[in-house]
Image (tube, grey):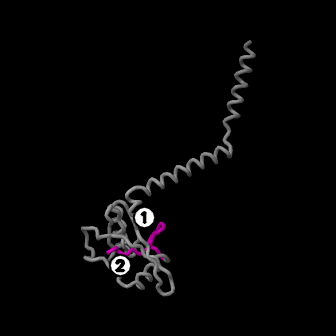
Amino acid sequence: MKLYGILAITALATILITSCKTTEKNYRTAYERTMTAQDTTHLEFEQTIYGRYRRDMRVSESIVGGDTVATRIQRVFITPGDSVPNKLKTYNLIIGQFKQLFNANSMRQRLRDMGYTDAFVVQTAEPYYYVVAQDYDDQAQAVAALKRMQANPPFRLRDPLPFLLRPAR
């Protein structure tokens, strides 16, 4: 009788151990679940106030020197406090975008330390902060600066940076 009990337990243990194998099917199912969750998270973020304001940003394309250049248009204003210009120029070279003012100010300071002495921070209504490396009234100069920044950024930039921003009037 004891022998039958031991054999039964051994058989059950063998079945349990072999049934817990990880297979490619299990990995694929977990991967697909994760990707679905990430897509949902992205949609949830886009439905927030930040996503709404970024969706409201208009894009204007113009031809400068034979190149088509996209300029984003959004209502922004200069963040108070700091030695910044009194008035925004027409074209602003954006090199950073943040939800927190502290992070934007930190990047602005790093830019100033690297020689971009005119760097400043602008914000939108929600607020969302953009770090301006340089600003221009002339579109050709702004496009040339954008190309230089794309070719040789001062630090690693994520898409869609850098870009030109024109304040909505």
Q: Amino acid at mark 2?
A: Asp
The spot of residue 27 in percent (x, y) is 64, 46
- Residue 42 shown in magenta: no
The spot of residue 75 in percent (x, y) is 33, 70
Prevailing secondary structure class for the magenta stretch in the rendered image: loop
Q: Quadrant of the N terminus?
A: top right
Which quarter of the figure has residue 52?
A: bottom left
Q: Which residue is mark 2?
A: 135
Residue 9 lies, with reference to residue 120, above or below; the image says: above
Q: Residue at x 25, y 68 (%)?
A: 80
Which tag, 1 or 2, sits closer to the chain's start?
Answer: 1
Q: Residues within 10 Å of mark 1 (few under 14, many from 20)?
A: few
Residue 39 is marked as: none
Q: Residue at x 74, y 21 (%)?
A: 7
Question: What are the residue bounds of the magenta stretch?
Answer: 152-169
Q: Nearer the viewer, residue 62 or 10?
A: 62
Q: Residue at x 60, y 49 (%)?
A: 32
The spot of residue 22 in percent (x, y) is 66, 41
Determine whether label 1 and label 2 are within 8 Å by CB: no
The outermost residue toward the top is: 1
Query: So how many labels did they put on this image?
Result: 2
Q: Nearer the viewer, mark 1 or mark 2?
A: 1
Q: Which residue is mark 1?
A: 55
Q: Is 83 left, or right, of 31 in this rendering?
A: left
Which quarter of the figure has residue 115?
A: bottom left
Q: Quadrant of the C terminus?
A: bottom left
